[in-house]
Image (cartoon, grey):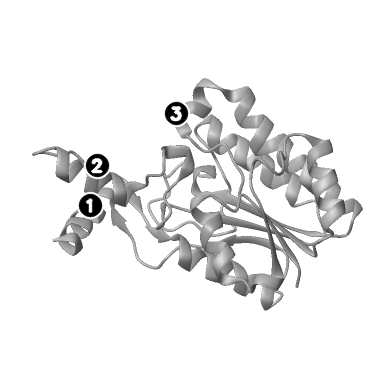
Amino acid sequence: MKVLLIGANGQLGRDIVTVFKPEEIISLVHEDIEIADFGSAKKNLEKLQPEIVINTAAYHNVPECENNPDKAFLINSVGLKNLSKICHNNRMGLVHISTDYVFDGNKNSPYTEGDTPNPLNVYGVSKLAGEFFVRRLEKHYVIRLASLFGKAGCRAKGGGNFVKTMLHLAGAKDRIQVTSNVICSPTYTKDAAIRIRELLAERYPSGIYHVTNSGFCSWYEFALEIFSQAK
């Protein structure tokens, strides 16, 4: 299995690199490839000729997406249109990392792959549009992740994530407010990376997959657990 990873220096990308053997994976960062530029994407993919492309590149700062919808759709939608066309023409498989933001959060129970998406913001709509382009491929995996945290931190958030933010605030403030009415399944990026590799290595059928750690909690409960483990 020859895998090309786009976004190797991101929070998830750094862990994906570690779960593959060095000879199995080729790692690219933004300086190497721009998925919104068809020529850049085509040049890299056709030169390297992977069996599978894993794309973790995205514009996923939610407030910034609202303020810059053109950029959000250019990267999250047009970028996936480009990758899908190139992969189709070269008989490559494509793994698209999507998000729980394609749903509206009103179900009050865990979402399944068969649930109908209903995104509420530009980020969610742009990611869902990207999904539709990917799903036209014969060999594809749309992997929806949620509430990620990892050792590397998220580059789009200045190298932070919820865990790092809570620990920083605990050292800077006497009082912290965290929402208790939003329920999530906090997901460790290393666990997500392992599962992504399993899907590919075990040749699961093409389709949509929800990948999170088990269990659920509110962001408030997550914060309490972070503080408890950090003492």
- Residue tagged by mark 2? 179
At mark 3, the secondary structure is helix
Q: Nearer the viewer, residue 167 or 131?
A: 167
Residue 158 in which image quadrant: top left
Is residue 128 visible in the rendered structure shown here? yes
Which kind of residue does numbered mark 1 sit on?
A: Ala
- Dot 2 alpha-carbon crowd within 10 angstroms: few under 14, some 14 to 19, many 20 or more: few
Lower sequence index among marks 2 and 3: 3
Whole-percent x, y for residue 84 in the image: 79, 48
- Residue tagged by mark 1? 223
Measured Cα–Cα span from mark 1 to mark 3: 22 Å
Whole-percent x, y for residue 193 in the image: 54, 65
Taking the view exactly as shown, the residue that stands out farthest to the top is: 67
Q: Residue at x 16, y 45 (%)?
A: 170
Quadrant (top left/top right/bottom left/bottom right) for the N terminus:
bottom right
Side of 148 where 202 appears, left or right: right
Measured Cα–Cα span from mark 2 to mark 1: 10 Å
At mark 2, the secondary structure is loop
Lower sequence index among marks 2 and 1: 2
Q: Residue at x 54, y 43 (%)?
A: 102
Q: Which mark is residue 63?
A: 3
Which kind of residue does numbered mark 2 sit on?
A: Thr
Quadrant (top left/top right/bottom left/bottom right) for the C terminus:
bottom left
Q: Residue at x 33, y 47 (%)?
A: 162
Is residue 181 visible in the rendered structure shown here? no
**Above or below: residue 117 compared with residue 15:** above
At mark 1, the secondary structure is helix
- Dot 3 alpha-carbon crowd within 10 angstroms: few under 14, some 14 to 19, many 20 or more: few
Which kind of residue does numbered mark 3 sit on?
A: Pro
Measured Cα–Cα span from mark 2 to mark 3: 18 Å
Q: Are marks 2 and 3 in contact (CB under 8 Å)?
A: no
